[in-house]
């Protein structure tokens, strides 16, 4: 080592991020209920549609007559 060398300077730590705002329980519950309602309204009848916008393009499967009994 050289007699004129020194330790490197340590940079100061970055400032801490600001604390998140405190929300009351009523605000949190109201936001959660609003989000659930928004998701419920957005789903609509989309889950009941089993075909695309063009409909079913296959031929109808009417089957053949069978003897019952």
Image (tube, grey):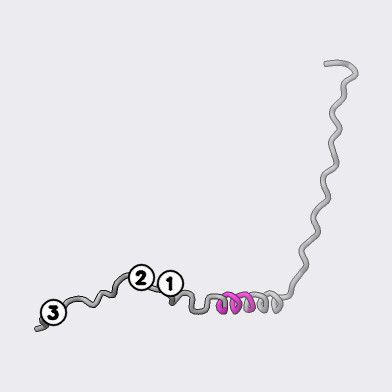
The image quadrant that residue 58 belongs to is bottom left
User: Badge 1: how crowded within 10 Å, few (<14), some, or many (20+)?
Assistant: few
Q: Residue furthest toward the right? A: 4
**Percent x, y for residue 6?**
87, 24
**Percent x, y for residue 7?**
85, 27
**Quick check: 63 left or right of 36?**
left
Q: Give the residue at mark 3.
A: 66
**Percent x, y for residue 56?**
37, 72
Secondary structure at numbered mark 3 = loop
Secondary structure at numbered mark 1 = loop
Q: Is residue 38 magenta?
A: yes
Q: CA distance from mark 1 to mark 3?
A: 32 Å
Tell me if label 2 and label 3 are in contact, CB under 8 Å.
Answer: no
Q: CA distance from mark 2 to mark 3?
A: 26 Å
**Quick check: 22 left or right of 40?**
right
Magenta part of the chain = 34-41
Tell me if label 1 and label 3 are in contact, CB under 8 Å.
Answer: no
On-image quarter of the C terminus = bottom left
Secondary structure at numbered mark 2 = loop
Q: Give the residue at mark 2.
A: 57
**Quick check: 64 left or right of 1?**
left
Please, is residue 22 above or below residue 69 in the view? Answer: above
Q: Give the residue at mark 1.
A: 54
């Amino acid at each position: 080592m050289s007699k004129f060398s020194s330790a490197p300077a340590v940079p100061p730590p970055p400032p801490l991020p600001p604390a998140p705002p405190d929300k009351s329980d009523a605000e949190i519950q109201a936001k959660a209920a609003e989000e659930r309602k928004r998701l419920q309204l957005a789903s609509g009848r989309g889950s009941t549609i089993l075909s695309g916008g063009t409909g079913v393009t296959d031929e109808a499967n009417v089957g053949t007559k069978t003897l019952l009994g």
